[in-house]
Image (tube, rainbow, N blue to C red):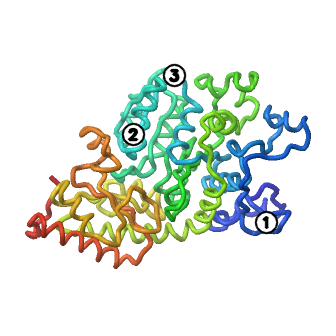
Amino acid sequence: MTDKPSRVEEDHAFGFETRQLHAGQRPDPNTGARAVPIFQTTSYVFEDPESAAAYFNLQEYGNTYSRIMNPTVAVFEERVANLEGGAGAVAFASGIAAQAGALFTLLEPGDHVVSSAALYGGTVNQFKHWLRKMNVELTWVDPDDPSAWENAVRSNTKAFFGETIGNPAGNVLDIETLAGIAHSHELPLIVDNTFATPYLCRPIDWGADIVIHSATKFIGGHGTSIGGVVVEAGTFNWSNGRFGVVAEPSPAYHGLQFHETFGTYGYLMKLRAETLRDLGAALSPFNAFLFLQGLETLSLRMERHVSNALAVASFLEGHELASNVTYPGLPSSRYRPLADKYLPLGAGAVFSFDCAGGRDGGQDLIRGVSLWSHLANVGDAKSLIIHPASTTHRQLGDDELRAAGVGPGTVRLSVGTESVEDLIWDLQQGFALVAATAGAGSGRKAAAS
């Protein structure tokens, strides 16, 4: 569970709740500090010129500069990797930076990516614009149609990408099926597991090769810090002839072949030593410390998040001014079988619904609530609400909005850990304003227009 486990620890399988508190760290050997120290330093003193040269040549592993590695950040990386069941992890300054880093490490100009069309709006924008600037082609597919993924594969395809729980459409990715298709073409499956967290789902257990988190969300859990992390399973064969950018000699390290040299850790070493070094999107030690605090209560918070989310979704499903409630944990959801398979402890806490009255109705609902915070984030202990068509997904066209499951009246909720009775009461105040403004409340269920 730590860098130097005892024989007793090696023979014992620790539970998730224990590992979220202890993995990757022992009390500080110099001071005895139980909490992870914040190593707020830019750089580190070398023992001698020879060891310094060995560090920079990647012949020995050690701290050189905090843009590349830092002891506080390292504990966070090791803990997330442990919870996800991965070989290791590399942290970044944001979730979107982690995503860019994961792709940048394996892609070259002229490559092609197949991606779910039901993604977070920021990811859609990154893929549409940044990948085009890199001269990387992109094919959007219906995440629920395995044949669409199969048919989209080309000779230059380098990865499949999807989200465990789609944002905000609430679709559940069939990870095992897509991993099988990807692997049949010798491709990695990359899964954004932000909404599920490793407590609710571990995509690597189902065949995913790379897992990405926006730690800003449920991992941090309190809306205080921005960061991201990439976890790799360590099982994908990067030397299969399709990934020269990982397997072939690197001009940045005098011809070093990352996969041949580091084996299981080849991709991760390239991600850290080249991509993080050159993009510079380093996670600060203080934010890593705050994320470690969040991880310590992850399981406890997620239990409350998902129980509250199911109660709120059930309330909305029965409300006359709400329709198309996308929570995959509802018995009526088309994704309930996949949720039962991949998310047996709960189907997350972020979902959407369509408010009567279309765009005006959705915005009136937000005006009418006071406990739900109107802001562009998810995964906070506090409950959050937003109108995607005018905010997070504003840059998308009509077709892209429909593909992402966003309508004019769609409202996205991130259900927090408050008393659920208070959350429902506050939504009722919002619906009262919708009814008063639109003259609704006729007793029939209104669909978003």
User: Looking at the image, which residue is at 74% across and 22% down?
Assistant: 255
State the separation of the CA atoms marked 1 and 3.
46 Å
Mark found first going from the N terminus, 2 or 1? 1
State the separation of the CA atoms marked 2 and 1.
42 Å
Q: Do the residues labelled 2 and 1 touch (CB within 8 Å)?
A: no
> Mark 2 highlights which residue?
124
Circle 2 residues within 10 Å: few <14, some 14–19, many ≥20:
many
> Mark 1 highlights which residue?
27
User: Looking at the image, which residue is at 27% across and 64% down?
Assistant: 366
Secondary structure type for disc 2? helix
Q: Are marks 1 and 3 in contact (CB under 8 Å)?
A: no
Residue 215 placement: quadrant? bottom right
Mark found first going from the N terminus, 1 or 3? 1
State the separation of the CA atoms marked 3 and 2.
19 Å
Q: Image check: 370 left or right of 381?
A: left
- What amino acid type should be assigned to the residue bearing mark 1? Pro
- Expressed as whole percent of the image width and height from the top left, the position of residue 341 reads 46, 56
- What amino acid type should be assigned to the residue bearing mark 3? Pro
- Expressed as whole percent of the image width and height from the top left, the position of residue 65 reads 74, 43
Which is more toward the observer, 204 or 373? 373
- What amino acid type should be assigned to the residue bearing mark 2? Val
- Expressed as whole percent of the image width and height from the top left, the position of residue 122 reads 41, 44
Residue 109 disc label: 3
User: Looking at the image, which residue is at 36% across and 36% down?
Assistant: 141
Residue 1 disc label: none
User: Looking at the image, which residue is at 27% across and 71% down?
Assistant: 427
Residue 432 lies, with reference to residue 56, above or below; the image says: below
